Image (cartoon, rainbow, N blue to C red):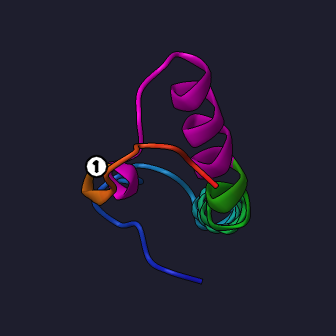
Amino acid sequence: MAEYSENTKGLSDDEKKIVGTYRDSLAISKEFVRPYFDKWVRFYKLFAGILPPEIECTYSKVML
């Protein structure tokens, strides 16, 4: 478990452990969700008509 001493001043040891566990769990969750979030951001941009940068180097600008 990582130490978060600068943000947990004034807390008891049990409270620091709970905050640390929560932050570690949040980091793991963000790491798991990031690829899915990035994929849906790309889908939304395509839906909104924003062309991906990979297509700029093609002549016809058609995605295959």
Residue at (51, 44) in percent of width and height: 62
Q: Residue furthest front?
A: 60
22 sits to left or right of 10: right
Q: Residue furthest bottom?
A: 1
Mark yes or no: residue 15 visible.
Answer: no
Q: Quadrant of residue 13?
A: bottom right
> Is residue 53 rendered magenta in the image?
yes
> Is residue 29 rendered magenta in the image?
no
Mark yes or no: residue 43 visible.
Answer: yes
Circle count: 1
Q: Tell me the chief SS of the magenta region.
A: helix
Q: Is residue 4 above or below residue 51?
A: below
Q: Residues within 10 Å of mark 1 (few under 14, many from 20)?
A: few
* Residue 57, x across and y down, in percent: 26, 58
Q: Is residue 14 above or below residue 38?
A: below
Residue at (37, 58) in percent of width and height: 54
Helix, strand or loop for disc 1: helix
Q: Label 1 sits on what residue type?
A: Glu
Label 1 belongs to which residue?
Answer: 56
Nearer to us in this view, 9 or 36 = 36
Residue at (60, 65) in percent of width and height: 20
* Residue 24, x across and y down, in percent: 63, 68
Q: Quadrant of the C terminus?
A: bottom right
Nearer to us in this view, 16 or 28 = 28
Q: Quadrant of the N terminus?
A: bottom right
Q: Residue furthest top?
A: 48
* Residue 7, x across and y down, in percent: 35, 52
Nearer to us in this view, 54 or 22 = 54
Q: Quadrant of residue 12?
A: bottom right
Magenta residues, as a range? 37-55
Residue at (40, 45) in percent of width and height: 60
* Residue 55, x across and y down, in percent: 38, 51
